[in-house]
């Protein structure tokens, strides 16, 4: 059975990059940054899903550089290339792919943690929708 994108994202962020401790430790900050990106995307006159990606991918990328090790990052990049072996390798940007998967992981984790909070549920439902819309591209 094929893995869901959330399972692949968890594999990348937790198993390959080792981000789980930092996500637990800094989740309130990550949560606030992603909510800020969503709010700014909501107020933009262009495609809000694309704007959310533009604002939140640097958060995921920064987390990778802050919380992972160089060895884990190199290993994760090799893993990404193996997962995308049917793709022309010159078309694969492993770090960009890992950042996108980390963003999916962060949004999914945030959704799970916040969906029962009446003040945050709408925002996190919208972010889940944004990530799903971007996966269609």
Image (tube, helix red, strand yellow):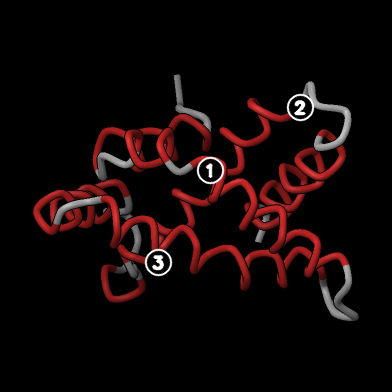
Q: Identify the residue at image location x=51%, y=40%.
A: 27
Which residue is denoted by mark 3 in the rendering? 96
Q: Nearer the viewer, residue 96 or 117?
A: 117
Which residue is denoted by mark 1 in the rendering? 106
Q: Secondary structure at mark 1?
A: helix
Q: Secondary structure at mark 2?
A: loop
Image quarter of residue 112? top right
Left or right for 117, reference 75? right
The label shown at residue 115 is 2
Q: Identify the residue at image location x=61%, y=57%.
A: 33
Quadrant where the N terminus sits is top left
Q: Earlier in the sequence, mark 1 or mark 3?
A: 3
Q: Find the residue positioned furthest to the left.
A: 71
Q: Nearer the viewer, residue 62 or 101?
A: 62
Residue 70 vs 116, above or below: the answer is below
Q: Mark 1: give few (<14), some (14-19) or many (20+) Cα within 10 Å.
A: many
């Amino acid at each position: 059975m094929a893995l869901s994108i959330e399972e692949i994202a968890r594999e990348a962020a937790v198993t390959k990059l080792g981000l789980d401790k930092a996500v637990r430790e800094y989740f309130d900050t990550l949560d606030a940054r992603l909510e800020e990106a969503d709010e700014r995307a909501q107020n933009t006159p262009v495609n809000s899903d694309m704007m959310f990606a533009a604002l939140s991918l640097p958060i995921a990328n920064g987390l990778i550089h802050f919380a992972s090790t160089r060895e884990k990052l190199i290993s994760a990049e090799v893993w990404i290339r193996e997962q995308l072996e049917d793709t022309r390798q010159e078309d694969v940007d492993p770090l960009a792919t890992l950042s996108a998967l980390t963003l999916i992981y962060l949004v999914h984790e945030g959704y799970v943690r916040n969906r029962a909070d009446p003040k945050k549920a709408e925002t996190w439902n919208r972010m889940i929708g944004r990530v799903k819309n971007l996966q269609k591209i």
